[in-house]
Every structure is written in structure tokens, then in C-alpha cells.
Image: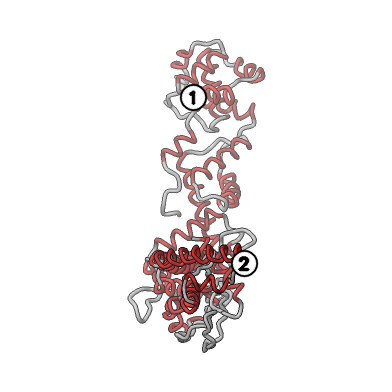
Amino acid sequence: MPRRRAITDAQLETLLTLPTAEPDLIRHYTLSPADLTVIARRRRPHNRLGFAIQLCALRFPGRLLQPGEVVPREVLAFVADQLDLPPDVLVDYAARPQTRYDQLDALYSVYGLQTFTRPIQREFAQWMLPAALTTTSGATLARLLLEELRRRAIAAPGPSVIERLVATALLKAERHIDRQIDAGLTGAQRDALEALLEIQADTALSVLAWTRQTRGLAGHRALARLIDQLVRLRSLAIDPSIVERIHTDRRRILMREGTRLSAQHLKMLAPLRRCAILAVTVLESITRLTDEVIGMFDRLIGGLFRRAERRAAEALQANARAVNDKVRLLVKLGDALIEARRTGSDAFAAIETVLPWDRFAAAVAEAKKLSRTDGPDYAALAAANHAVLRRELRLRGRRQRRTPRGGATVGSRGPKGLSGGDEDVSQRPLTLMHLNLDTSEEPPPTAVGNTRQPRGSCTSPLLNRTNDETDLRVAQRSSRNL
């Protein structure tokens, strides 16, 4: 028997109450000529009105009126008006209890209604399972049950029976999904999922609690931890197809339980339920961590470029006086050359009238140093800040040299995520995750004449100096994303 209520009393009352709005009354309680003929067979006015009210209640919401139940005045006035009777005559209805039962027998006989018997209850218990697999709302499932009962002309049972049917169907749906997920796992994967609940040797946290830690402020340590968490979960190699046919709401509930429950509480659950929660949590966490790694990496690289651009702007401002001096010198030289052309005199002599030739050569050399390109050279910025890039990966590189749990590597291909669509975000090529994690501080060769090669082979399109065009494209994309 389920241990929690699947539907509240207020929700049951909303589903079983008689309608009072005029559109609902017209839709459900309008009597046909055939109905009026059957009603007219009752001899006394109060019996005709009571018979009609019982008929309307059986049609919608599909239940019997309880002895002594107060009928809303809107319903009473609407039905009585169709019978040309005053609403107050209902006071004398069912003064003799047998009258009510006789009229119910007549209703069942004339309209082919059925009572909710044990065989029908067992049939509906099976019918509700597919519906329960598509929703987690007890109120929605109860509404579907009442609609099917009305369609089959079966009088609805009492509220307690409805609640019990809904709760049982939801529980069966949970167990069905748990078995479905467990069938897609291997024995090694089940053991790996159980290992997520164990306390790590070097910390006081379980592996699951460690993977659920927030990323914190963007930095190389936070980025390294995110990659460690992602690698740890991807090493389980859980196939995401085991949850593809599970309704989104069901997966959301499993994910919420995996996020909310501690390792101790998860250990208290049934093994099937525990494995289902952990499997969905792992798949959803892979998608989340992949997004966070990409986002943090973009922020770090974008911050690096912004700092470099700010330093370049400050340097330009600091050299503003020298630039102005060179502009004034250019004006003087230009005037001298224009005058030499006009008079036909020697151009070199005209230059020496402004300043000596050696000082002219020194001024040109200074101007070269002050010159800047039209836009930021992202490849040059990355090369100039190579030490910062290596620092972002140093901590991760040290950890990578240790034997990873589950035999996974940083570049290993993991399972797809649950975000939907043809493209799986967890399988996007991560620039950071494909970097060579050697901790060497030796910078790559740059355009300024550094011809030394890095000690390790670098597969990153950002750090590999053998392809400047790719460097520039990747760097510009990272900067634009910020």
C-alpha cells in the first residue's frame, strides 16, 4: 500500500463537485426529449425533480448523490426550470429511503449504467498504469480516471477508492520505470553507481556529494574540479538511451531526488529505486557539468583577453605624448618634402633641414614600436599570456598524471546527456578537455622571434602555434561569447 497521499481532499472535491457555472450547466445538464420522457414517468413533482438531479449527477461528474447532500441552488434552478417545477419541491424528495434506491435501479436499467465492482476495479488498475507513466500528478490521473468512467457509463466510486487507485497506479509506474532503467545497466555499472555513495578516502564527502558541489568563483581551481567531476561521472559510461522513453516529468522527479537526498538517505531506499535515481542523476549531471566547463573556460579566456586589451589601452594612453610628437614631426617632414617637390630641390636635403638623418632613423624606429594593429591580435595575446593559460591547467595536469578512477581519461568519450535533440551537449568538443596537460612552463614560439618548441605536443587549437589561423578563430569566438 502506498505510504503517501497521491491526491488531496481539495483536489478530490474539485473533481467530484457538481458544476455551478452556466456554461458547464448548459453543457452537462441540458435534458434531451428522451430524458424528459423518462422523467415524466415519475408521478410526483418532487420525485421527478429528484430523478432528474440524480441523472445529471451520474452524467457529470459521474457519481451518485449522497443521502442528505446539499445540491447547489444553481443546479437545482437550472434542472427545475426545464421540468417547469419550483426548485423547493426537492425538499420532499426521498422522504422514504426506498424511493431513492428504486429510482437508482431505474436509472441503471434505462441508461445502461454500471456500478464500480471488484472486477471493474481490477480492470481499471491495469488501465491506469500507461496513463501513470506519462504523468506524476495524482489530480491529473484522477481526472483521467473519472473521464474514462463517464465514457464507459460506470458510476464513480467513493473518494477513498479513487485516491487508493491513483496512489497505487503511481507507485506501480515508479516501480516499472525503476525496472526499465535497471534493465539497461550492467553489473559493473550498478556497482559503480553504488560506489558513488561511499565516502572518499581523502575527504569527508561521498563521491555523489562531491560531484554535486557548486562551481564557486571562476578560476583555475574551480575549472579543474569541474573537469574532475565530469571525468568521474563519464567514466561510468551509462547509455542515455535507457531513459529516452521515460517521461520528462518522471526523469525530473528522479533527478530532484538524486539532488536532494543525501548518500545516507539513498542507501535506505530499495536497490532498484536507488539505481534508477543515481543513473538519471549521473546523466543529467554530465550535461550540467559540461555546460559549466564550457562556460567557465570561455569566461577565463575572455577575462584573459580583456585584461590584455586593457593593458594595451593603458600603454597607448601612456604613450600618447610620444605619438603626438611623432605626428608633429610627420607634419614638418611632409611640409619640407612638398616644398622640395615644388622647387625641384633634393628630397634628402629637405629632410635634413628638419632634423639630422640619424635622428630621423631613430624617430622611425620609435614610431614602429608605438604602432598598433587595427584590431586585437588574439593569437598574439594568447602567446603573450601563455603562463596564465598554463596556470589554468597546472592543477588539472597534476591530477591527470595519477591513475583515474574507472579508467577514464580527460579526452575519453562519455555518454550523451538528456537535453534532447540531435546534438548532445556533453559530446561537444571541449577545447579545454583536449589540451595537453603537461605542466611545463616553456612558452610556445611567438611571432617576436621565439623559436623554441614546447616540450610536449599540444593538441589545443588555442595553444598550438603551428596553426595561427585556427588560433585566431578560436580566440575570437571565445571573446565574442563573453
Q: Is residue 137 above or below residue 371?
A: above
How far across and how far down the image is residue 24, in percent?
A: 55, 26
How far across and how far down the image is residue 209, in percent?
A: 39, 69
Q: Nearer the viewer, residue 357 or 367?
A: 357
Q: Is residue 466 above or below residue 375?
A: below
Q: Nearer the viewer, residue 457 or 253?
A: 457
Q: Residues within 10 Å of mark 1 (few under 14, many from 20)?
A: some
Q: Is residue 122 above or below residue 397?
A: above
Q: Secondary structure at mark 2?
A: loop
Front label number (1 vs 2): 2
Which of the two discs, 1 and 2, labels the residue nearer the N terminus? 1
Which quadrant of the rendered structure holds the N terminus? bottom left
Residue at the extreme right of the image, as rendered: 34
Residue 276 in sight: no
Tell me the colour scheme of the image: secondary structure
Q: Which mark is residue 377?
A: none
Q: Which residue is mark 1?
A: 20
Q: Which mark is residue 344?
A: 2
Q: Nearer the viewer, residue 403 or 357?
A: 357
How far across and how far down the image is residue 437, in percent?
A: 49, 82
Label 2 is placed on what type of residue?
Gly
Label 1 is placed on what type of residue?
Thr
Q: State the count of labels.
A: 2
Q: Nearer the viewer, residue 56 or 363?
A: 363
